[in-house]
Image (spheres, rainbow, N blue to C red):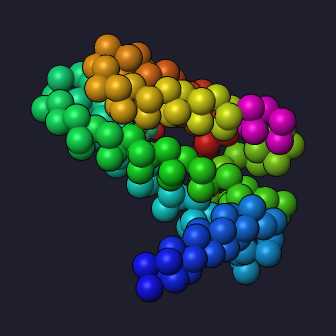
Amino acid sequence: MREFAAVIGSTLILSLAALAAAPAHAQFARPQDAVKYRQSAMTLMAAHFGRLAAVARGAAPNDPAQVKENAHVLQMLASLPWSAYGPGMQGGDSKSNIWSNPADFKHKREVLQTHIAALSAAADAGDIAKLRAAVGAVGASCKACHDAYRK
Ligand code: ASC
């Protein structure tokens, strides 16, 4: 029974991964659905990043278990918005230059994800100095992309 559950579980995870990798136009019926999806993901990213930033600046207690959980959730969330910037998915607060600079947009996304991976590693290690540095780097990469591509 446990094996059966494991097979169902891994099948579900593989299906979700395949879905996340499918082209955006196959996933969103209308551009406004894509806008809502990416805004929802970023709202959640801001909530979890905000909790980590509060710990980094000493405004919230450093509870290592909560820090780890927030970092892991943030890392997972940071994989989500990008499929919702597919062809024809303009709208919301996005500037249209996202669609004319796909290579730079992708680069900025990868920089963000690299810094979030470092943040997650710092959280796993319980290293507050590295966490502070990573929070700064993640915040700077949020800002770099927003400055270039958000209205
Ligand atoms: C947040 C949030 C952002 C980033 C950015 C960091 O929590 O909502 O857009 O951090 O302010 O510079």
Foreground residue among 67 and 137? 67
* Count of picture labels: 0
Up the image or down, 96 lies above or below 90; here it is above
Seen in the image, is 77 located left or right of residue 60?
Answer: right
> Residue 75: image x %, image y %?
49, 44
- The part of the image, by quadrant, that contains residue 109 is top right
Look at the image and say whether residue 96 sits in the magenta stretch: no
Seen in the image, is 11 located left or right of residue 134?
Answer: right
Up the image or down, 87 lies above or below 4; here it is above
Look at the image and say whether residue 106 sits in the magenta stretch: yes
Foreground residue among 50 and 150? 50
Q: Main secondary structure of the magenta part?
A: helix
> Residue 73: image x %, image y %?
41, 50
Up the image or down, 126 lies above or below 87; here it is above
The quadrant of the picture showing ligand 1 is top left
Task: Please report the bounds of the magenta region as a residue range.
Answer: 102-107
Name which residue lies at 70% across and 46% down: 95
- The part of the image, by quadrant, that contains residue 8 is bottom right
Name which residue lies at 75% across and 62% down: 21
Seen in the image, is 35 located left or right of residue 102?
Answer: left
> Residue 137: image x %, image y %?
49, 21
Q: Is residue 148 visible?
A: no
Up the image or down, 74 lies above or below 5; here it is above
The N terminus appears in which quarter of the rendering?
Answer: bottom left
Q: Is residue 130 visible?
A: yes
Name which residue lies at 50% across and 52% down: 77
> Residue 57: image x %, image y %?
24, 22
Name which residue lies at 13% across and 32% down: 61
